[in-house]
Image: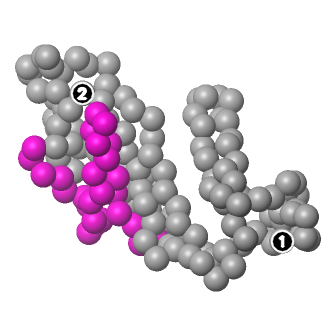
């Protein structure tokens, strides 16, 4: 039976909150570089790309930024140096766009706004190892309304 529990983690340096859904572990232990989780029914080694046969989905999205500019911004493309099979996510104001990654992620011309966020979403349970994520942003000369 899935209880639909969510564990919340607070990064005390950035104050960012991360949620992990269906996470039912009570305790964790790192032994010889391997992470173990403890539940009522036993001890589990936390590794691999599946959880009880289901692919583990992973994604992240940075916090929003306005780049300290009160002007509209257009994200032209995003360069990513990362291992794994993934799509690029670009948050523009209240909307998150998901773009296939083909060496770089190119967005449509109409994707612009004041506040931006960036991230990746794994495909087919692929492990994400991110070295860099660099957006190419054009800042309009016009102030936003």
Q: Position of residue 65 (x, y in %)?
A: 36, 29
Distance from disc 1 to disc 2, alpha carbons, whole Å, reads 44 Å
Asked whether the viewer can see residue 113, the reply is yes
Residue 106 painted magenta:
yes
Q: Is residue 67 above or below residue 93?
A: above
Residue found 43% across the figure and 71% down from its top: 123
Q: Is residue 79 above or below residue 46?
A: above
* Relative to 127, 12 lies left or right: right
Q: Which residue is mark 1?
A: 44
Residue found 63% across the figure and 53% down from its top: 20
> Is the image coloured rainbow, by chain, by secondary structure, or in one colour?
one colour
Residue found 69% across the figure and 66% down from its top: 2
Q: Specify the quadrant that holds the N terminus.
A: bottom right
Location of residue 37 (image quadrant): bottom right
Q: Badge 1 local density, few (<14 within 10 Å), some, or many (20+)?
A: few
As drawn, the label of residue 114 is 2
Q: Which residues are magenta?
A: 84-110
What element does badge 2 sit on?
loop
Location of residue 120 (image quadrant): bottom left
Q: Position of residue 111 (x, y in %)?
A: 16, 43
Residue found 60% across the figure and 37% down from its top: 17
> Do the CB atoms of the residues marked 1 and 2 lie less than 8 Å apart?
no
Q: Quick one: 38 or 79, which is closer to the camera? A: 38
Q: Position of residue 47 (x, y in %)?
A: 71, 72
């Amino acid at each position: 039976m899935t209880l639909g529990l969510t564990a919340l983690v607070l990064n005390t340096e950035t104050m960012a909150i991360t949620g992990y859904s269906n996470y039912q572990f009570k305790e964790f232990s790192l032994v010889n570089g391997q992470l173990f989780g403890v539940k009522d029914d036993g001890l589990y080694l936390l590794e691999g790309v599946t959880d009880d046969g289901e692919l583990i989905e992973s994604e992240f999205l940075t916090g929003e930024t306005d780049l300290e500019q009160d002007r509209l911004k257009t994200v032209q493309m995003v360069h990513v140096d990362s291992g794994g099979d993934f799509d690029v996510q670009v948050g523009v104001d209240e909307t998150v766009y998901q773009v296939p990654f083909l060496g770089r992620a190119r967005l449509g011309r109409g994707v612009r706004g004041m506040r931006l966020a960036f991230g990746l979403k794994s495909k087919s349970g692929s492990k994400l190892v991110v070295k860099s994520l660099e957006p190419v942003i054009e800042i309009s000369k016009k102030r936003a309304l």
